[in-house]
Amino acid sequence: MKNRWNVIVIGGGHAGIEAAWAAAKFGRAAMLVGNPATIGRMPCNPSVGGPGKSQLVFELQALGGLMPTLADQTAIHTRVLNASKGPAVQSLRVQNERDLYATVAQDALLSVPELDILRGEAADLESDGQGGWWVVTTDGRRFWGRSVVVAAGTFMRGVTWYGRQSRHEGRQGEPPSRYLSAALEQGGHTLKRFKTGTPPRVRADSVRFGDLTVIPADQPARSFTGTPGPHAEASPTWQTHTTPLTHRLVAENIGHSAMYAGDIDALGARYCPSIEDKIMRFAHHDRHLLFVEPEGLETSEVYLQGFSSSLPPELQDVLVRTLPGFEQAVIQRYAYAVEYDVVDSTELTMNLESRRLPGVYTAGQLNGTSGYEEAAMQGLVAGTAAARRAAGLSEETFSRADGYLGVLLDDLILKGCDEPFRMMTSRVEHRLLVRQDNADERLTPLAQRLGLVGQVQLDAVQAKYRRVEAGMQALARQRLDGKPAEVHLRRPEVSLADLEAQGVQLPELSREEKEAVEIRVKYAGYLDRARRQLDAEAKAGRLSLSGVDFAAVPSLSLEGREKLLRHAPTTVEQASRIQGVRHADISALLVHLKQRQGGGGRSAHS
């Protein structure tokens, strides 16, 4: 077997899949190192999307990623969340057939001729002294790559906890990555310890579904790719809730929790708390909603979303049976917490390349994020950048204005994270401009330029928006009650379907294209205002900091100077988002740039 590749990807989770998928598109050899049997496994909830996350998946679709296709092909329930709210926060969520998702992912990667898959555990990274890297496995094999993407998930020095009992695992039943942490530390990286968890899986035949609240799938089904899968409406999901007895038992037994007993000092996710955290931190609530979700059409398990825990198994049995509908429940797989090593994401470039180890990229939960979607997007970014570096192509980066992917990268690199990072719509300042419905319009031209999608996909997207524009023009031409039809559509209570019922004629449009017309017409004033605000911010933000000696800029605060020297932002926009850099520091930078420009220096605009 050959031992030289352009890109070597370590790990077969959602980040590793997208990194390998992207890297292989550049027509040169790529390799994924991991366990082929566990590629694409969904260790937590078998679902894709949701608020702040579906936007990333639609952007992955626009950029040629694989996750949207996998999600649609294996969907068993789809639902648009926040459907009654504005388009900026509407989010598709897809429940997936867990085992089938992994199978389809493995089949997809195995079908790529440019991609090799190697079973092995990466143990070390060795520089060749010329910009390339040797990946050394635990059995002593050595493989050379021009670039390397490390996507080790929650496996680096992973430890799982069931109550106060622990074992060395990356996730339930799988060995940890034992040596990569040391390799990154020896290369100069600072590692932190994070913690996440997963709920119990319950035998479906032990649940009284008649006592639960049914959540039906949307009809017709929605999708990320425009093509819903064959079983996208096949199953409902359900709701139950905690009870006063649940709360009392947790409070009485909180000392058995590894977190509360002090056995785990890793940092957990604020936005995905365990059931212990919910009950202890929010004692004023007498119940917490829980979502009961199938793991597949043929599997025997349901997933108890919202009930992650590090309490011991025997207590989980008792607690689960306090829930309505679960009085006779049988747990098939117990909840556990997992702690693991993560890198300090501020030690990375905007393309997730290590500042300490040039040519090594990191992606996914290893960078401190939580969630499949965040991991997948990082994998695509890292895999693309690694492949372009290996091919000698120019580096391309994403900005916050590009969408949720830019916000994700920007926050990770410039702000870092002291707890598992979760993407949310509230993180995105101009979310009305970067909705899930216009991701293809925003990002497909960029994807084509980067080499991630072909001209055919770009042509299809451009044709779509020509039809959308024709629909808007049709509304402007036709009149109802003496006014253009578009004026009527701007009223909150009027829909495009209402206007068609009154005789307004539109060109032939798909459902998605009609929705695009309606959003653009109904929110035209808000969209124009958001664009003007973004342009004003961008004008100041584009000012380049290239060549600026932050140590010599007068009036910077001590903390601001330290953070600017550490992060080395290249624009005022980046500097403004670094934690510890104050508004007064930005003012001092602007004054410095103006003086430098006025003194005959080169233009400060990038």
Image (cartoon, grey):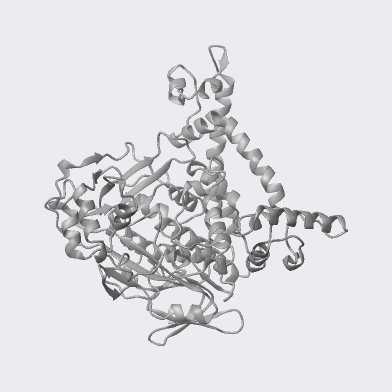
> Is residue 299 visible in this depiction of the protein?
no
Q: Please provide percent x and percent y for residue 8.
A: 48, 74
Considering every residue shown, the one lying at the far bottom of the view is 140
Q: Quadrant of residue 526?
A: top right
Q: Where's the C terminus, which quadrant? A: bottom right
Considering every residue shown, the one lying at the far top of the view is 481
Q: Nearer the viewer, residue 303 or 235?
A: 303
Q: Residue at x 51, y 43 (%)?
A: 435
Q: Where's the N terminus, which quadrant? A: bottom left
Q: Please provide percent x and percent y for residue 430.
A: 57, 43
> Is residue 589 visible in this depiction of the protein?
yes
Q: Quadrant of residue 172?
A: bottom left
Considering every residue shown, the one lying at the far left of the view is 328
Q: Please provide percent x and percent y for residue 600.
A: 88, 58
| Residue 13 position (above or below residue 469) | below
Q: Nearer the viewer, residue 36 or 589?
A: 589
Left or right, residue 363 beside residue 310 = right
Left or right, residue 91 beside residue 555 = left
Q: Residue at x 49, y 55 (%)?
A: 64
Q: Nearer the viewer, residue 264 or 116?
A: 264
Left or right, residue 498 beside residue 390 = left
Q: Please provide percent x and percent y for residue 522.
A: 53, 29
Q: Residue at x 59, y 72 (%)?
A: 355
The total of numbered circles placed on residues is 0
Q: Nearer the viewer, residue 289 or 382?
A: 289
